[in-house]
Amino acid sequence: MANKFQAMMSAGLAGVTVLGCRGGVDSAPTQSETSFAHGESRLPGPIPIQVPASPSEGGRAPTTEMQTIIDAALADASRRTGMPVAQLVVASAESVVWADGSLGCPAPGMSYTMALVPGYRVRIRAGEQFLDYHASNRGYLLLCPAALAVDPAPVQSS
């Protein structure tokens, strides 16, 4: 069983670095690859995706532009679906503020920083399927399963 799972992981994630939820480098299974013995399955948690680093601006913490997040989300969606990027549609891309460090995608049993986090939400349509990506403005990007997705914090009007 382990060898079959390792082979699936190697084939499905070749060429992409996926960061594990607890900070180490890991190969997280996609939704279709998440299964256990006896046919039991579970909903996958958030799947972090590596985004190219942006340079620091005048000593401040580096931020990532929305286009970089969109490009990383499109590349990941293409890899996951097998569809060329040209056939994927960016259904929406917006700057948001997440209510906490989960970036609107809290994994069961995890604790998060209780502070507002500026970032982005990108929804990509691949045929009839939608992939929901949540990101911080520092370039931390997650593929968020629909069952875990939480809307961003409401925008405060001045």
Image: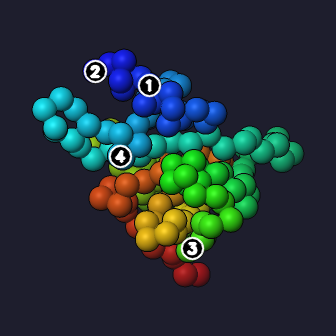
Indicate the position of residue 88 as horizontal and vertical percent values.
60, 66
Indicate the position of residue 25 as horizontal and vertical percent values.
53, 25
Q: Residue furthest left?
A: 38
Asked where in the image residue 29 lies, by quadrant, the reply is top left
Q: Residue furthest bottom?
A: 158
Which of labels 1 and 4 is toward the front? Answer: 1
Which of labels 3 and 2 is toward the front? Answer: 2
Circle 4 packing at 10 Å, graded few (<14), some (14-19), many (20+), is few
Marks 3 and 2 sit apart, C-alpha to C-alpha, by 39 Å
Q: Which mark is residue 1?
A: 2
Considering only order in the chain, which callout, 1 or 3, is on the residue closer to the N terminus?
Answer: 1
> From the viewer's perspective, is 69 left or right of 146?
right
Considering only order in the chain, which callout, 4 or 3, is on the residue closer to the N terminus?
Answer: 4
Considering only order in the chain, which callout, 2 or 4, is on the residue closer to the N terminus?
Answer: 2
Q: Amino acid at mark 3?
A: Ser
**Element at badge 4?**
helix
- Judging by the rendered image, the residue that carries numbered circle 4 is 32
